[in-house]
């Protein structure tokens, strides 16, 4: 189901008109193609497998990297990382692994 629901954008040049036409916002969003962040959700694991999943909150979590477009639709989701994994580690692994099909902007763009 996720393959049908979570898709990269057809075009990376779709910025909402109210942002394009507003000099207050456009300088900050002119090269933006979406938002990316990591989020933690609680994980239930056998006791002997919990340690790598215990993050800064002190309990077992999964760190999930998500990317969304300007319409707040997910374009990429990568669950399953240990709660102790840093967001930058997950990001660098995602962009370096072609099998994951991370939505890179077209070559020649910022």
Image: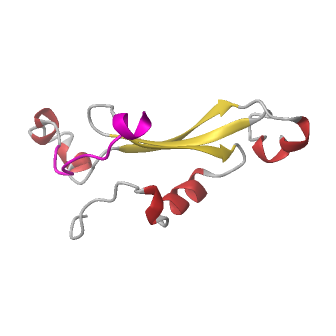
- Give the residue displayed 12% in from the left and 42% down from the top: 20
Q: Main secondary structure of the magenta part?
A: loop
Percent x, y for residue 101?
Answer: 40, 57
| Residue 74 shows up from this direction | no
Q: Is residue 43 above or below residue 79?
A: above
- At 16% across and 44% down in the image, what residue appears? 14
Direction from residue 54 to residue 69 in the image, left or right: left
Residue drawn where x is 18% and y is 45% of the image: 26
Residue 68 quadrant: top left
Q: Nearer the viewer, residue 1 or 100?
A: 1
Vertical comparison of 13 with 110: above or below: above
How many numbered dots are placed on residues in this image?
Answer: 0
Q: Does any portion of residue 39 appear in the rendered image?
A: yes
Residue at x-position 55% and y-position 61%: 93
Quadrant showing the C terminus: bottom left
Percent coordinates x, y for residue 76 in the rendering: 41, 44
What colour scheme has been applied to the protein in the rendered image? secondary structure
User: Looking at the image, is 97 positioned above or below residue 56?
Assistant: below
Q: State the residue lying farthest toward the right.
A: 48
31 to the left or right of 4: left
In front: 100, or 93?
100
Image side of residue 8 versus residue 44, left or right: left
Q: Is residue 89 above or below residue 63?
A: below
Residue 92 in the figure: left or right of residue 101: right
Question: Whole-percent x and y of residue 108?
Answer: 21, 70
In terms of image quadrants, where is residue 55?
A: top right
Query: Which quadrant is the N terminus positioned in?
Result: top left
* Front residue of 21 and 11: 11
Question: Where is residue 89 drawn, in percent x and y?
Answer: 60, 58
Q: Is residue 95 magenta?
A: no
Instruction: Find the magenta span and give its range.
Output: 1-14
């Amino acid at each position: 189901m996720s393959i049908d629901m979570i898709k990269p954008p057809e075009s990376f040049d779709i910025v909402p008109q109210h942002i394009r036409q507003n000099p207050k916002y456009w300088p900050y969003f002119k090269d933006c193609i979406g938002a990316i962040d990591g989020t933690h959700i609680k994980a239930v694991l056998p006791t002997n497998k919990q340690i790598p999943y215990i993050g800064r909150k002190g309990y077992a979590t999964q760190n999930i990297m998500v990317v969304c477009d300007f319409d707040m639709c997910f374009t990429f989701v990568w669950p399953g990382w240990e709660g102790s994994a840093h967001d930058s580690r997950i990001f660098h692994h995602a962009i370096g692994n072609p099998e994951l099909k991370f939505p890179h902007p077209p070559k020649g763009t910022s």
